[in-house]
């Protein structure tokens, strides 16, 4: 079993429920709970020690710091929400740095699909499934949907097609 498949196999069972929780929370309340960010980070810190070589583990933690710093800059210009940057920083260590370009392509595809799906549901009778969701009335998009989708699909694809 390759290193990518090995780490994805370890991370996925712990990460997937958190992804569902965050997506649901962001859709329903336009909030990403701090507890979910801390739990995701705790999953990486604990499982990463088993799933990754130490040097890779440490570099990925450094990558989370970089994502957080870039997110703070974007937040200061109003380009992204605080919950989104915290979650993006917590999910960053799960990505292999060599896959950065592929992660960006995956994020773009998931973002487009998430926006299209959200807009379709918002403007059709599908909206009645969850009538109280805050995201239906918000002028902002619940980015947690796209962020969690990217993380979940990345790990699933790594498990299936990892090298």
Image (tube, rainbow, N blue to C red):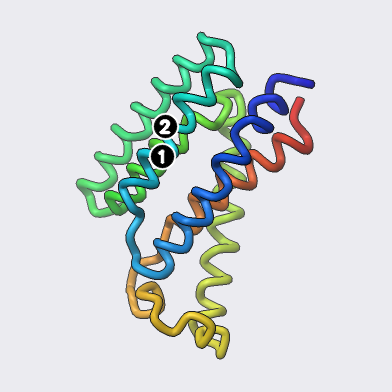
Which residue bears the numbered disc 1?
A: 39
Q: Residue furthest left?
A: 76
63 up-or-down from 112: above or below = above
When asked about the image quadrant of residue 136, the answer is bottom left
Toward the top, the furthest residue is 55
Secondary structure type for disc 2: helix
Give the percent coordinates (x, y) of residue 134.
35, 75
What kind of element bears circle 1?
helix
| Residue 152 spot, x, y in % from top left | 60, 46
Is residue 159 or residue 47 the one in the foreground?
47
Proximity of marks 2 and 1: CB atoms separated by less than 8 Å:
yes
**Number of numbered discs visible in the structure rendering:** 2
**Residue 119 to residue 16: above or below:** below
Of 77 and 21, nearer the camera is 21
Write the residue at 38% across / 36% down.
89
- Tell me where residue 109 appears, x and y as whole percent: 61, 54
As measured in the structure, the alpha-carbon distance from the residue carrying label 2 to the one carrying label 1 is 5 Å
Q: Quadrant where the C terminus lies?
A: top right
In this view, the residue in front, 113 or 151, is 151
Give the label on residue 114, or none.
Answer: none
- Horizontal side, residue 70 vs residue 160: left or right: left
Figure quadrant of the N terminus: top right
**Residue drawn at (42%, 25%), measured in percent from left and top?**
63
Residue 92, above or below 29: above
Q: Residue at x 56, y 40 (%)?
A: 14
Residue matched to label 2: 42
Q: Position of residue 113 (x, y in %)?
A: 60, 63
Q: In this picture, is 65 found above or below 119?
A: above
Structural crowding at the residue carrying mark 1, measured as other residues with C-alpha within 10 Å and reported as few (<14), some (14–19) or many (≥20): some
Nearest the viewer among 104 and 1 is 1
Q: Specify few, some or many for label 2: CA neighbours under 10 Å numbering under 14, 14-19, or 20 or more.
A: few
Residue at the (69%, 20%) spot, across then down: 3
């Amino acid at each position: 079993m390759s290193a990518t498949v090995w780490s994805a196999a370890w991370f996925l069972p712990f990460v997937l429920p958190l992804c569902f929780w965050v997506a649901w929370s962001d859709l329903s309340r336009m909030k990403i709970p701090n507890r979910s960010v801390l739990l995701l980070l705790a999953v990486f810190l604990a499982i990463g020690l088993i799933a990754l070589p130490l040097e890779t583990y440490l570099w990925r933690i450094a990558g989370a710091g970089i994502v957080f710093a870039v997110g703070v800059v974007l937040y200061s210009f109003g380009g992204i929400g605080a919950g989104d940057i915290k979650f993006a920083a917590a999910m960053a260590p799960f990505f292999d740095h060599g896959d950065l370009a592929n992660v960006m392509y995956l994020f773009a595809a998931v973002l487009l699909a998430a926006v299209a799906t959200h807009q379709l549901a918002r403007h059709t009778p599908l909206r009645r499934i969850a009538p109280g969701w805050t995201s239906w009335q918000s002028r902002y998009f619940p980015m947690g949907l796209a962020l969690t989708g990217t993380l979940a699909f990345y790990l699933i694809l790594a498990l299936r097609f990892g090298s």
